[in-house]
Image (spheres, rainbow, N blue to C red):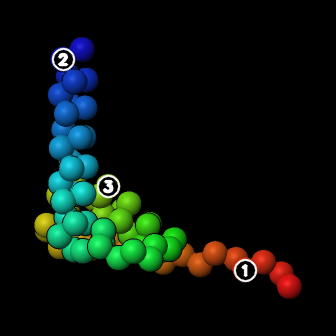
């Protein structure tokens, strides 16, 4: 059981570091959010400490337009 709790703590720390990196890049300041910006914030958080060794994940998504 002890190993599971250590892994859980490490995952939380990993995600917190990613959230800090997203904040430092200014991803939270823009009021207008779209699919690509939300995706970029999410992958930046998931990348965690890898953001500080050169990883700069970006997401480009295009949602289909409704027919007219």
Alpha-carbon distance for marks 2 and 1?
50 Å
Q: On the image, numbered disc 1 is attached to which residue? A: 65
Q: Residue at x 18, y 38 (%)?
A: 10
Quadrant location of residue 43? bottom left
Label 3 vs 2, first from the N-terminus: 2
Q: Viewer-proximal residue, 18 or 7?
A: 18
Residue 46: which numbered mark, if any?
Answer: 3
Task: Tell me the SS state at disc 2.
Answer: helix
In the image, is 46 to the left or to the right of 7? right
In percent of width and height, residue 67 lies at: 83, 81
| Circle 3 residues within 10 Å: few <14, some 14–19, many ≥20 | some
> In the rendered view, does 1 fall on the left or right side of 43?
left
> Which residue is painted at 22% across and 24% down in the image?
5
Gap between marks 1 and 3, in whole Å?
A: 29 Å
Q: Which mark is residue 2?
A: 2
Instruction: Estimate the x, y position of residue 66 in percent, counting from the top left.
Output: 78, 78
Residue 58: percent from left, percent from top: 37, 75
Q: Nearer the viewer, mark 1 or mark 3?
A: 1
- Disc 1 is placed on an element classified as loop
- State if disc 3 and disc 1 touch (CB < 8 Å): no
Residue 51 visible in the snapshot: no
């Amino acid at each position: 059981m002890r190993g599971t709790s250590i892994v859980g703590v490490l995952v939380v720390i990993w995600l917190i570091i990613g959230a800090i990196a997203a904040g430092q890049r200014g991803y939270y300041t823009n009021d207008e959010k779209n699919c690509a910006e939300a995706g970029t914030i999410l992958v930046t958080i998931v990348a965690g400490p890898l953001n500080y060794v050169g990883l700069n994940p970006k997401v480009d998504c295009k949602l289909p337009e409704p027919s007219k």
